[in-house]
């Protein structure tokens, strides 16, 4: 009888890529996903620790699934498992395997091991890792869009971030391995691939091949001209003329940037150990939009970092109002234990952080609506998602990352089609397949 598996994933796109790889390996070993209401034989939780709240959610998820599947073998991995393996071992009442981020390639084998010992630890010293774990898969689940992790780890040590301690130093996947994985995704029918990593712009710096992130994008776009490629996130100083030229040369390199800002105040940026100024960030955005006026530009911003007074917050808000951004990912700053910022003076109280988050999210909605309205009446290529939305309509994202819903036949699912953007209602764009 096939073993029944549950995989619960918290956090970033890298975790999602890794969990998709676990699922493929389990299925190739004769397992299947547990259906709703079924008791699982193995439960995998891929945890997150980017904030204190994410760590708490990871613990709660482990407890909830342990209660729901008391006879299952628990397998816990991810960033919270890397930094708090001892705490997790104490709360788990069933046989458990805790796998560090540097050993995820061993996870499926360990999960399927018939050894009934109460605790298996596959941790290792993540800061000593010099090579990325090579996780392969035939397909990215039933998703239209596949994530391809090309890099892991980070060397930046921003003062608010725990990730360098849980993911280790920057490590890149060989170009040949990336091209092979992209080919597997193409064979499985994925029409869009998002390159992801912890610090994608550092791709290749640790390899002897001499390739950087632009070389990688060019190689992928040329090898698969019928597949759309996106970068998940890239630091402002890593958006080079070479990268912008590559985007202009390749029709399948999508006009979409996601650029972490974190603060629009220079004093706060320095306290965060971010390596740019607000003026430099603004200049990068202006350059992107001058070359690609239709491009979507997403921004990450933290509200309420220690020492962010009214003046510093006003500087952030003014910068965001000024720059031509499409959407914002707004997060409240939190005291992440183990980071320097957790010990900084002038911590901002929760109510003030929440007020600032609400204000920035309101601004984000206005910017998003403005960008969407700019494109009403235009035609854009759109990749149709595999599932219809709750209203029974087809939906998908345009090349410049506008979500559009429209009526159409099932034959369009999974295809790239031209869509005219016709109307907008509360940030929901409706269109028509041309």
Image (cartoon, helix red, strand yellow):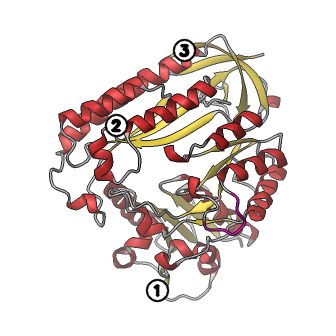
Tell me how far mark 1 sits from mark 2, CA to CA.
49 Å
Disc 2 or disc 3, which is closer to the eye?
A: 2
Rate crowding at label 1 as few (under 14), some (14 to 19) or many (20 or more) other CA atoms within 10 Å.
few
Q: Which residue is nearer to you in this view: 104 or 32?
A: 104
Q: Please say if the residues under marks 1 and 2 sit with CB atoms less than 8 Å apart.
A: no
Q: Which labelled disc corresponds to residue 338?
A: none
Residue at 28% across, 45% down? 268
Which residue is identified by label 2?
A: 264
**What percent of the width, then of the height, locates residue 308?**
22, 42
Q: Is residue 285 visible?
A: yes
Disc 1 or disc 2, which is closer to the eye?
A: 2
Main secondary structure of the magenta stretch: loop
- Point out the tag, 1 or 2, that comes first from the N-terminus: 1
- Which type of secondary structure does the marked residue at label 1 adopt? loop
Which residue is identified by label 1?
A: 118
Residue 311 placement: quadrant:
top left
Q: Which residue is nearer to you in this view: 232 or 286?
A: 286
Rate crowding at label 3 as few (under 14), some (14 to 19) or many (20 or more) other CA atoms within 10 Å.
some
- Which type of secondary structure does the marked residue at label 3 adopt? helix
- Point out the tag, 1 or 3, that comes first from the N-terminus: 1
**Going by the image, does 63 lie left or right of 256?**
left
Tell me how far mark 1 sits from mark 3, CA to CA.
57 Å
Q: Which labelled disc corresponds to residue 373?
A: 3
The stretch of residues the image draws in magenta is 206-211
**Going by the image, does 376 lie left or right of 260?**
right
């Amino acid at each position: 009888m096939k073993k029944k598996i549950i995989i619960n994933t918290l956090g970033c796109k890298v975790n999602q890529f890794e969990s998709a790889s676990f699922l493929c390996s389990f299925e190739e070993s004769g397992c299947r996903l547990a259906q709703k209401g079924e008791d699982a034989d193995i439960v995998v939780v891929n945890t997150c620790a980017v904030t204190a709240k994410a760590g708490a959610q990871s613990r709660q998820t482990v407890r909830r699934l342990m209660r729901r599947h008391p006879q299952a073998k628990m397998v816990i991995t991810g960033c919270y498992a890397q930094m708090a393996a001892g705490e997790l071992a104490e709360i788990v009442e069933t046989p458990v395997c805790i796998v560090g981020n540097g050993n995820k390639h061993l996870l499926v084998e360990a999960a399927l091991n018939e050894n009934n010992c109460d605790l298996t630890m596959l941790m290792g010293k993540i800061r000593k890792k010099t090579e990325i774990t090579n996780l392969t898969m035939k397909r990215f689940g039933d998703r239209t869009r596949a994530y391809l992790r090309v890099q892991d780890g980070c060397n930046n040590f921003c003062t608010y971030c725990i990730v360098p301690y849980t993911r280790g130093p920057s490590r890149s996947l060989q170009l040949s391995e990336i091209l092979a994985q992209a080919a597997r995704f193409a064979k499985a029918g994925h029409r869009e691939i998002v390159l992801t990593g912890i610090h994608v712009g550092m791709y290749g710096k640790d390899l002897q091949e001499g390739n950087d992130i632009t070389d990688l994008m060019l190689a992928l776009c040329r090898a698969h001209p019928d597949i759309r490629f996106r970068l998940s996130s890239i630091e402002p100083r890593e958006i080079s003329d070479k990268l912008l030229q590559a985007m202009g040369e390749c029709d399948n390199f999508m006009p979409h940037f996601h650029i972490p800002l974190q603060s629009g105040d220079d004093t706060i940026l320095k306290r965060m150990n971010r390596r740019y100024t607000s003026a430099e960030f603004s200049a990068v955005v202006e350059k992107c939009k001058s070359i690609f006026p239709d491009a979507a530009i997403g921004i990450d911003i933290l509200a309420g970092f220690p020492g962010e007074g009214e003046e510093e917050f006003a500087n952030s808000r003014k910068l965001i109002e000024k720059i031509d951004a499409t959407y914002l990912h707004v997060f409240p700053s939190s005291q992440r234990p183990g980071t320097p910022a957790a010990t900084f003076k002038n911590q901002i109280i929760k109510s003030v952080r929440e007020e600032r988050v609400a204000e920035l999210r309101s601004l984000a909605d206005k910017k998003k609506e403005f960008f969407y309205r700019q494109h009403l009446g235009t035609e854009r290529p759109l990749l149709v998602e595999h599932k219809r939305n709750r209203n029974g309509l087809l939906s998908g994202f345009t090349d410049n990352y506008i979500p559009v819903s429209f009526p159409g036949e099932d034959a369009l699912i999974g295809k790239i089609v031209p869509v005219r953007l016709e109307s907008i209602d509360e940030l929901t764009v409706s269109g028509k397949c041309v």
